[in-house]
Image (spheres, rainbow, N blue to C red):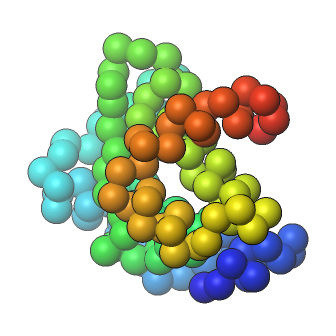
């Protein structure tokens, strides 16, 4: 997928979600990573998310090779759990790619290797733009 596709305002992640692997099949990732699937995992009780290592909004695949259970920490509010923090990074990097300020490949490699390196900038962007 190219940066141009991602910049197209008509493109949505829904067009590629669950095409390669069904939502149900993705739950096998919990076993692969030896993580117990939470019994109650929704709303304020959500502690895990089956996440894309390289997010769909940055051209990541929707297959099992790009899915992992991202969990915790339990003792913080929902907005501060790791998967919610990574969502902010994903939105920040997608905005940088769409605006032409970052190459798509650099964003993909960076988020896959260590998404937390972008967290301070993503939090600032989120606060400044109001697009959290």
Count of labels in the image? 0
Q: Where is 57 relative to 38, above or below?
A: below
Q: Name the residue located 60 percent from the left edge and 85 percent from the top edge.
A: 1
Identity of the residue furthest to the right in this view: 9
Q: Is residue 49 visible?
A: no
Q: Could you say which is closer to the camera, residue 101 or residue 112?
A: 101
Q: Where does residue 4 sit, x and y in percent of width and height? A: 75, 82
Q: Could you say which is closer to the camera, residue 7 or residue 76?
A: 7
Q: Where does residue 18 sit, x and y in percent of width and height? A: 53, 74
Identity of the residue furthest to the left in this view: 34
Q: Name the residue located 17 percent from the left edge and 55 percent from the top edge.
A: 33
Q: Where does residue 86 sit, x and y in percent of width and height? A: 49, 43
Is 76 on the left or on the right of 84, as rendered? left
The quadrant in which residue 38 appears is: top left
Q: Name the residue located 52 percent from the left edge and 75 percent from the top edge.
A: 105
Q: Where is 113 relative to 100, above or below?
A: above
Q: Could you say which is closer to the camera, residue 96 or residue 20?
A: 96
Q: Could you say which is closer to the camera, residue 77 or residue 58?
A: 58
Q: Name the residue located 53 percent from the left edge and 32 percent from the top edge.
A: 120
The quadrant in which residue 19 appears is: bottom right
Q: Where does residue 119 sit, x and y in percent of width and height? A: 50, 37
Q: Can residue 112 be seen in this view?
A: yes
Q: Where is 101 relative to 39, above or below?
A: below
Is 15 on the left or on the right of 114, as rendered? right
The quadrant in which residue 66 appears is: bottom left
Quarter of the C terminus within the rendering: top right
């Amino acid at each position: 997928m190219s940066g141009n596709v991602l910049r197209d305002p008509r493109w949505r992640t829904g067009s590629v979600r669950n095409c390669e692997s069904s939502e149900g099949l993705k739950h096998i990732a919990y076993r692969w990573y030896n993580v117990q699937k939470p019994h109650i995992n929704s709303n304020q009780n959500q502690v895990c998310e089956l996440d894309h290592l390289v997010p769909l909004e940055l051209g990541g695949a929707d297959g099992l090779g790009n899915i992992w259970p991202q969990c915790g920490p339990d003792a913080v509010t929902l907005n501060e759990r790791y998967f919610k923090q990574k969502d902010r990074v994903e939105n920040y990097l997608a905005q940088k790619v769409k605006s032409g300020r970052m190459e798509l490949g650099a964003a993909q490699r960076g988020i896959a290797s260590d998404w937390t390196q972008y967290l301070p900038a993503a939090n600032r962007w989120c606060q400044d733009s109001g697009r959290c």
